[in-house]
Image (cartoon, grey):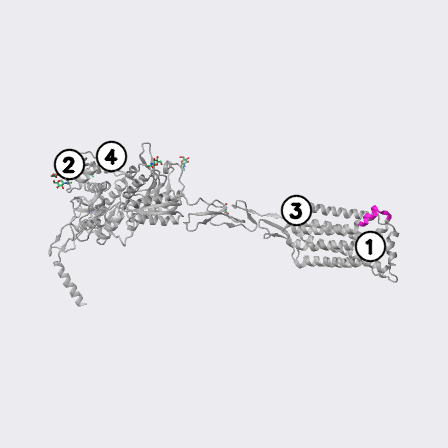
Amino acid sequence: IVPILLILVVSLSQAGEIVCRQRGDPENPQLFKDGNIILGGIFSFHSSWKDRQETYTHKPLPLECTSLNFREFQFAQVMRFAIEEINNRTDLLPGISLGYELYDTCGSVARSVKVALALANGNEAVTAPSEAPCTRPAQVQAVMGETSSSICMGIATVIGPFHIPLISHFATCACLSDKTKYPSFLRTVPSDYYQSRALAQIVKHFGWTWVGAIRSNNDYGNNGMAIFIETAQQLGICLEYSVSFFRTDPPNRIQKIIDIIKLSTSKVIVAFMPFPDMDVLIHQLSLNNLTGYQWVGTEGWIIDSQIAEMDKHHILNGAIGLAIPKAHVSGIREFIINVKPLSSMGNNMFTEFWEALFNCNFNQSNSSAENHKECTGHEDVSGLQHSFTDMSLMPIFNNLYKGVYAVAHALHSILGCNETCNYKMTLDPFTILQHIKKINFKTKEGDEVYFNENGDPPAKYEIINWQPTENGVVDFVTVGLYDASLPADKQLSLQNKSLVWAQNSKQVPVSVCSEKCPPGTRKVLQKGKPVCCYDCIRCAEGEISNITDSTTCVRCQPEFWSNDRRDTCVKKEAEFLSFEEIMGELLTAASLFGTCMTAVVAFIFYRYRKTPIVRANNSELSFLLLFSLTLCFLCSLTFIGRPSEWSCMLRHTAFGITFVLCISCVLGKTMVVLMAFRASLPGSNVMKWFGPTQQRLSVLAFTLIQVVICILWLTISPPFPFRNLKELKDKIILECALGSTVGFWAVLGYIGLLASFCFILAFLARKLPDNFNEAKFITFSMLIFCAVWITFIPAYVSSPGKFSVAVEIFAILASSFGLLICIFIPKCYIILLKPEKNTKKNMMGKGAQKTI
Ligand SMILES: *[C@@H]1O[C@H](CO)[C@@H](O)[C@H](O)[C@H]1NC(C)=O
Ligand SMILES: *[C@@H]1O[C@H](CO)[C@@H](O)[C@H](O)[C@H]1NC(C)=O
Ligand SMILES: *[C@@H]1O[C@H](CO)[C@@H](O)[C@H](O)[C@H]1NC(C)=O
Ligand SMILES: *[C@@H]1O[C@H](CO)[C@@H](O)[C@H](O)[C@H]1NC(C)=O
Ligand SMILES: *[C@@H]1O[C@H](CO)[C@@H](O)[C@H](O)[C@H]1NC(C)=O
Ligand SMILES: *[C@@H]1O[C@H](CO)[C@@H](O)[C@H](O)[C@H]1NC(C)=O
Ligand SMILES: *[C@@H]1O[C@H](CO)[C@@H](O)[C@H](O)[C@H]1NC(C)=O
């Protein structure tokens, strides 16, 4: 440790012999005034410079600056005004005079760094050895400027480590809020962090989701546009293109941008650029006559009357954008145009300025341009129509004015000024910076001035609309406000004023990639395109979307179905076989017709009950059969109509029982025929075994079995009404669920069993010789019966909804008619039309004889 300390001490003791020498050529301020305390000012009196091809074989010559910028002269004048006003005041810094040194940067970052160092160091070439240490207090206590963000970044980087405050009136880049990089940077203009967001909100507000973007290729444009794009994406805005250029770019680059605009489909262009770049752009746009676009602008050009003047083709008419709120500082206009005092300030700056302002020459003799008139030096500035006398940048003047006052107020409090100030105090930029950051005062116009922790003022903007007036001059109309300090939904407030849009239209222009998707459709993104470009696809059946621009279609509830327009779910129609519809009516009619027919047959049989044909045919079973047929016809009615708990239970059981009753009667009859034949054989008394009692009992027994099956079915798992949502997409089928399939098939199976049994017996008996052999008819009727029910099964299984019910009814009716017609009609025919055959003799007839 000791040797290191020793070395330190040695090196410190040598410090006195170090000679501090300025590197490079000394820089002289363009304008200066002496005072107790000096403020620096950095402005780009020239906005461009001649591009020299450096050979790197010799020291580069100083920049040759071009394009005088009268606005920056205005800014310089405003700074001089504020300083003079403070010096005139007795309540602020009494007895202390402020001075200034104003330098020109020519818009070059390199040059601005150089002049910033000149401001900090002073211009003495050499500090003599042993006289004073190299570390000296800074020459200026604070620096005002610059206009451009890029240049401010350069300056702030250089003077930041020395804590010399830099207060900008117009450098809005959000990047400058980074206090780790730019610790001594403050500004009186809001950060673009807010402006970019506000612009995106405005674009969103007017429904423009498909926009183009042009920015200037510097920190202002690039950073501002980056935040805009980020916010725009969050708000669902898409950029068709985003291009950049800088004012010094070759013309073909701007031409390329214009070609891109011409090819684009978006109608809104967001231009994030300061006025020198906009100036170049509008010139090119005018040459190309590029009208019909809605421009959205930043505070950099939106209230610039010079841009409006340049816009001969009214390309920018209807432009909308953000501006620093309008302000007024009394006395400033008179001070600015009073430029005569500048002439006494030394260098040739004033000459150049005056010559450019009045387009004249002082030394006509050796001037290259002949047509210039000679300057008298007494020209009248106040009567001049020129950007120098135009006060449209008053809000920016106000920012600069507030900046100078902020420094003055900070100095006032540091120096403990009361009646007088503490002159002895050595000023230290760090203390000044701390005081400026904490400042809070009101200007004479009532503006409150303070800085937040990032050195930014509160963000407030006016929304400006370019409205043409009768005489062709554009009026910058304030149509709304944006205040970032308010809650998100209240920040943007548009006043109830009529806006003018591109090409003097009253209609808000439309700039979208795809039209909104109406309800009933959904968005489908186009492949490889931004999210704002999409197709509208109609929702599928059973799905709806009831909002515009829906991304999905929602499936309807099971009991609902989409309407034709796919924008609401409608209740599905209930479907069942009703008495109202034609099919139901026909089946009802058929059923009633069958019932009547049975009744007529029964009546005929009753009427002729004494005749042999009725007696021979076992009249008791015949009447029972007719009765059961009536029930069969009627039970088909239970299948028609809205299914209820009762009708469901009734349907299959009534059908099962009546049919079994019916078939068992027929079976009884068949047996009787068979028995009767056996009985006619000699020595047989079979008839004794199958007399009327046995017949009744067997019918009862067969029927009872079915009744038991039905009771079991109904008790264990009865049929119930069921809403079938699956079978048909757009309808609910009201049907009777079987409850137990086993029950259903047991009922049917039992009928089938009896029917087959009956068929076999009848088939065996069909050839028995009897003059009036019923067996033939029974066989035939059973054939029909079985055919009907065998075809029923596949038809029943495959018919959807109410048709399966209709098929079942049809089967019931068909088989009932089959039985009725085959068994009874031939007899009725004989009874009514061939009474001569209806004799006992004929009954016993040949057949009997033959058999015997
Ligand atoms: C400052 O005071 C002088 C002398 O009274 C006056 O001429 C000048 O206009 C004042 N300046 C300002 C900016 O008020
Ligand atoms: C520019 O457009 C306007 C109207 O759109 C037209 O009147 C004018 O002639 C055009 N000028 C040129 C140079 O194309
Ligand atoms: C004009 O030129 C003369 C010499 O030719 C010189 O003395 C004078 O200062 C010049 N005036 C200006 C305004 O530059
Ligand atoms: C005009 O002439 C003077 C002396 O003759 C010279 O110093 C000056 O540079 C000349 N000015 C121009 C613009 O040529
Ligand atoms: C300022 O003046 C007032 C009275 O005029 C006095 O009371 C006060 O102490 C003074 N303050 C300073 C810092 O001199
Ligand atoms: C806005 O202005 C229109 C007519 O210019 C008027 O009808 C309407 O009531 C106004 N709305 C509000 C909120 O002031
Ligand atoms: C859209 O449908 C949903 C669900 O179906 C419903 O809650 C909502 O109220 C509907 N909105 C409109 C505007 O009809």
- Asked if ligand 7 lies within 8 A of label 1, the reply is no
SS of the residue under disc 1: loop
Front tag of 4 and 3: 4
**The quarter of the displayed image where residue 702 is located:** bottom right
- In the rendered image, which residue does mark 4 sit on? 385
Question: What mark, if any, has residue 773 been given in the picture?
Answer: 1
Ligand 3 neighbours mark 2 (CB distance < 8 Å): no
Q: Is residue 834 magenta?
A: yes
Whichever of callouts 3 and 1 sits on the residue coming sooner in the sequence is 3
Q: Is mark 2 on a helix, strand or loop?
A: helix
- Mark 3 and mark 2: span between their CA atoms? 112 Å
Most common SS among magenta residues: helix
Three-letter code, disc 4: Gln
Image position of 749 with respect to 238: above or below: below
Side of 332 relative to 523 (left or right): left
Numbered range of the magenta stretch: 826-836
The image quadrant that residue 147 belongs to is top left
Q: Do the residues labelled 4 and 2 touch (CB within 8 Å)?
A: no
Label 3 crowd bin: few (<14), some (14–19), many (20+), radius 10 Å: some
* Label 1 neighbour load within 10 Å: few <14, some 14-19, many 20+: some
